[in-house]
Structures are given as C-alpha cells and as structure tokens.
Image (cartoon, helix red, strand yellow):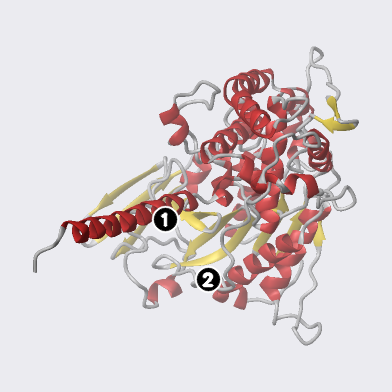
Amino acid sequence: MFLTKPMAIRIFLIFSSFLLLYIFFQIPREVSSFEIIEHIGSKKPYPILSEREDEVESPDGYHLIQVHLISRHGARNPITSDVFRFDALQWLFANCSRVGEETKWIKSWKNPFTEFTAGLLSHNGEHELYLMGKRASTRYRKFWGNFTYHSNFVDFKSSAVSRSGQSGSAFALGLFEGHGSLGKASLQPVYIRTEPKGLDQELAMKHACPLWLTTVAKSKKLELEKSRYLDEKISPIARRITEKLGITPPLEPIHVDYINRACVFEVSFFRNTSTWCSLLTKDEILTLEYLTDMEHYYTYSYGNSLNSKMACKLINNLIETVDEALEGGSQVKSVLKFGHAETIYFLMTALGLYEDDHDLKADSPSDQIASRKFRTSEISPFAANVYFEIYQYSLKEKLKPRSEGLLKGITTTNTNTTTTTTTTTTTTTTTTTTTTTTTTTTTNTTTTSKNHLVDPLIRLLFNEIPIIIPGCETLYCPWSRFKHLMQPVIGCDFQEICRVSSKSRHLKPKFKIAGGVKIILDESNSEM
C-alpha cells in the first residue's frame, strides 16, 4: 500500500503531536523531582519514620556495655521572631497590583502560627522522638533486656527548654513502652534532670558562655559575608518578585529571607509548596539554602574557632562516664540527652565531622558551594542525633558463634602500644609510667587477667547511620584512639574558655520595624 501525500501529512502531524506531548510532560517531571523539603535546613523533618530497626550486632568477642545519645528536640513551632516575620509578610504583600491565578492566595493567606505556641514542640515533633525511642528499643533489644529501668541505670537529661524535655519524655515512651507498670500499654515514667539556662554547659552551652554571646553571636565576619551575599545573590530575587507582582513599596533583600522562612515552615508542617515556596525558583531555593548554611557555619561550627571548644564538657562527661564503667565503678548503662540544633553542631565540630577544606563564603565558587559537606538539611534536621556505642571484650562473647567480618581492619593498639603478629599468635605489650603488662593470646584474642579487652571500642551513629569518626580507621574505633583524638578538649575549663576579657562588651539585640511590627534581628536564640 502506497501512502498518499495527505495520509503522509496526517501521520507526520500525529507523530509530531505525540512527540510534543512527551516533551511537555517530561519537563514538569524533571522539575517535580526537586524536593524542596530536602533543602529547608534545620527545619527539615526527621527523615526516618519507621518503628523498628535491625538489632545491632556486636563485633566478634565484644559486648555492648553502654549507649549514649545526644539528640536535638523534635519539630517545633516557629519562634516568636519568625511569627513576627510572617505577620510582616501580610503587610509587605498587601499592595500587589499584578496578582494572577497562581498567586491569588496572597490576598487570603493568614499566618497559621501564633505567639502563644511559639517555639513549642509540635505533634510531629512528639512523634519523631517517640518513633526514635521505638527504634532504639529494637536496635538494642538485648542490651535493654539485661535490666529494668532505674534512674541509676539510665540517665536522662534535657535542657531547661520545654521542647527538649518533652522530646526526652516522648523518646522514653517509645523506648520503654510495654516494659513499664502503668496502664494497658505498660508505660514507664522516667526522671529527666535539667540545669538552669545559663548554667547548662552541656546542652545549652552557648547561654553559659559569655564569650560566645559577645563575640560569635555578633560575628562581624558573618555580618560581612551575609551582607555581601544579600547584595549579590538575594537582591536580584527581591527585584524579580517585586516586578512580577507589582509590589509597592518594593521588597528589600531581607524580605526574601522572610519569604524563605515562611516557605520552610509551610513545607515542614503542612507539606505545602503552593504558597510562599511558589514564589521562588529551584535555583533561588538553593541560593537561600546556602545562606542558611553559611549563617550556621559561622555561628555554630567551623567558621569560628571557639565553636570547636563549646562541646568540651559534653565530651568530657562522656569520657568520664565510659571510663568509670570500664573500670567497674559505675552502674550507668545509658546516658540520654536532649538539647538543640546547636548542641549537635558544637559536638559535630569538636568531632571534626562534615568539615570542608574551605570556608563557606559569599563569593565561594559555584563548584565549592555545590559540593560542600556542611549542609544543615543533612546535619541537623529536627530530632538530629548522635549515638555513641561502647563495646568491651568478653571471653564469654568470644566463645559464642558470631558472624564474620565485623572486626575487619580493627586494631587494638594505641599510641603507646607495640604489636607483633604471626600466623598463630598475637603478642601485645602495653607500657605505662608505673607498670609493664604483657598479654598473650591465640587466634587474635587479646585479653587481660580480668578478661577485659585491652582496648574497648566506640562506634558513632550520626542520625542513626554508622559513620567513621574522623581520625579513626574503621567504624569500630579503639577507645584509646578516640581519647587521643579528643585530647584538645579533655580536662577543659569551660568557664575559663568562656571568660570575657575587659575589652569585650555585651551587645544589645537589634530590631527593625516592618509594617508597624518589631522584627527581632538577633539570631543568637534562633535554635533554642
């Protein structure tokens, strides 16, 4: 059959139509693959929502003797200054001359957040910590099964802020549900200790550090970088939105930050991208994400050397608690602490995690920005957490059948140890200033006369994912190696570190009036 010219034209038109439809639907699919919720910084919901976790398997010959947790609180309501910013948006967008079908929501939008609930833990936040507790109960099932709850066995602590204390309570409900004595669900009440704000050097350390409050919180370096970034990167966004919607008076760069904050909470709380988020393009959202990362980098992390010392009391107490248990002088099985985003940042910085080989700057090359390790969305979402697992050698555990490979690459030597290995026997000699102890073992088992491991092991989980501690070679790091890495903060004097010199002075918070509303520009309390 031969095609006539009209038939050929018809077939061509049909084929062209299908091709255009395919291209048309492919473009939105690529755009929709960009998930805004993955780029909303420290207001990102916690990504793991399961109730169960595979049970942890101890390395060959070891058993888990302690579990330490440092967690941020769960999802919270916007703090008061953000509520004021959202109120200001209603005034700023009151005079829009070009509101179309896609932006008509502007005329009817009302701030869903109030001062009354500002900063309080949300229902989502309660759920995040409850599920984290449920996962901890299954991940460490055998560990928890060895004892019943007692405040002398399990030490709960939170900052003196309600959302942190509630987060600890929610975690405890999930952790011990079914193992307590109250009600049909067999709930277990727990004791959570706190220290007053201003005295808490572990979980709310910035408020206990006058030097941090007078220098880092008011960092001139951050102000300079932020000012440059607002002028170079954020000003064009303000102009574009102003022109698109015909806004009078025109938006200032700082107002784009208000829009982004509103977008972040609309997504975090309601999974809604059709209001403030719709005013921003994908590239603009990434630009604003970097602004947030830059602020946190200088305020809580590697952007200031003082930040590397802020978790020194937290780390010292961890080391002291573990050493007491290893020496048999403590009954503490677990220490569970609940603080804030900066608690996680300060600890992460002291450990050397997610450190780039360059500062985050306003004029950083685009390839450095795109490949940076420091991303608040990944480091400190709501309910961000750090687990430390402590393992000790046990002859009884060695005699039990175990899966192979967990100890691959692990060494039990430290900086003062010499090890010689043959095909059948390993001899380890450890020397101190007072005694010399020689220990011999067969088939790679190193024990002392007390049947203890020459060097216990520590493993780190960051947001429930095992990662290698910087400076260690494997996931299971020798305890002596970890202590050697933490030497710069061991025995620190927090009060001396935070002492303000006579030249330092306290600065008052800055304010700005927008539409008759006082906007707090002081961000030192933004994560508390």
Residue flagged by tag 2: what amino acid is it?
A: Glu
Considering the numbered disc 1 on the image, is that residue within a helix, a strand or a loop? Answer: helix
Residue at the left extreme of this rendering: 1
Percent of width and height locating residue 267: 65, 52
- The 10 Å Cα crowd at callout 2, few under 14, some 14 to 19, many 20 or more, is some
Q: Which residue is drawn at 80% across and 72% down?
A: 189
Percent of width and height locating residue 162: 83, 54
User: Where is mark 2, residue-wise?
Assistant: 53
Q: Distance between the residues labelled 1 and 2?
A: 39 Å
Percent of width and height locating residue 253: 68, 26
Percent of width and height locating residue 449: 45, 63
The residue lying toward the viewer, choosing from 201 and 505, is 505
- In this rendering, is residue 469 above or below 123? above
- The 10 Å Cα crowd at callout 1, few under 14, some 14 to 19, many 20 or more, is few
The residue lying toward the viewer, choosing from 441 and 489, is 489
Q: Residue at x 33, y 56 (%)?
A: 17
Residue flagged by tag 1: what amino acid is it?
A: Phe
The residue lying toward the viewer, choosing from 380 and 490, is 380
Q: Residue at x 23, y 55 (%)?
A: 9
Residue 153 in view of the camera: no
Q: Which residue is drawn at 41% across and 47% down?
A: 430
Residue at the top extreme of this rendering: 503
| Residue 225: image tag | none
Considering the numbered disc 2 on the image, is that residue within a helix, a strand or a loop? Answer: loop
For the C terminus, the quadrant is top right
For the N terminus, the quadrant is bottom left
User: Where is mark 1, residue-wise?
Assistant: 25
504 vs 63, left or right, is: right
87 vs 486, left or right, is: right
The residue lying toward the viewer, choosing from 405 and 20, is 20
